[in-house]
Amino acid sequence: MRIDVVTLFRDMVAHAAGFGVTGRALERGLWQLATWNPRDFAADNYRTVDDRPYGGGPGMVMLGEPLGRALAAARAAQSAAGYERTWTIHLSPSGRPLTHPRVAALAADGDRTAYVLVAGRYEGIDERWLAREVDEEIAVGDFVVSGGELPALMLMDAVVRLRPGVLNDAESATQDSFADGLLDCPHYTRPESERGEQVPEVLLSGNHAAIRRWRLKQALGRTWLRRPELLAARSLSGEEQALLAEFQREAQAAVQQ
């Protein structure tokens, strides 16, 4: 799998991507990363990459020409590396929200498709260039940050960790929040008692069927409490409906005590 990032801050992206799961996978050759600075492709001596917006207003707008040359260089490198297809993603608060199914699809297609992530800065990028060159716009949340580098790093981490061989235990990804449309259940580790609070007894029982049932009930309940819209979009099995009703009864009883 290969990801190229067009960014004014190459060191920021390369450095952050070298940590944790993504960094270890990069060292093992499970994915490749390249960065491209539009300033290196500017046509003037000042390496200009932005200009004032038409119509007035605050801030500056990134120029299409340096971005276009950087993107062309990234695509050429991907083609030379043998990838059948390239897909260009602009990280933008105006994009569609990033979801687990979209992350999983990007990860699954990584064998034949190389990705270019465009990390903009300032007030934005010339719209004509975006319409012509970008295949998809993605938002990582309903908020604004100073540039696209942090969202690009978030997208890379989410996608890379789903690639084969990246996680020590592949089952870890299948139990993450959103993997099956639910938030993850609570987790506990040693000691059994901490400040008077005990680990739930079922987790110490060794009864795998009971543990599975408890974890599913907690995942359903946590999703109901925190992200009810996820439940509304998901069909619940008979067992899940019963477990959710059980959680709701227990929650109501706890409030009444």
Image (tube, rainbow, N blue to C red):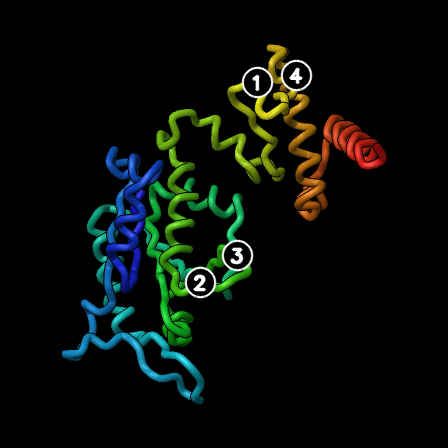
Secondary structure under tag 2 reads loop
Give the spatial CA distance, label 3 vs label 4: 37 Å
Identify the residue under disc 3.
Answer: 141
Q: Give residue 47's position: percent from left, percent from top.
A: 19, 75
Give the spatial CA distance, label 2 vs label 3: 10 Å
| Image quadrant where one finds the C terminus | top right
Mark before the other along the chain sequence, 1 or 3: 3
Is label 3 or label 4 in front? 4
Q: Which mark is residue 145?
A: 2
Secondary structure under tag 3 reads loop
Is label 2 or label 3 in front? 2
Q: Quadrant of residue 254?
A: top right
The residue lying toward the viewer, choosing from 35 and 204, is 204
Under mark 1, the amino acid is: Glu
Identify the residue under disc 1.
Answer: 192
Mark before the other along the chain sequence, 1 or 4: 1
Identify the residue under disc 4.
Answer: 201
Report whether 100 appears left or right of 132. Answer: right
| Crowd class of label 3 (few under 14; some 14 to 19; many from 20; radius 10 Å) | some
Report whether 174 appears left or right of 69. Answer: right
Is label 4 or label 2 in front? 4
| Image quadrant where one finds the N terminus | top left
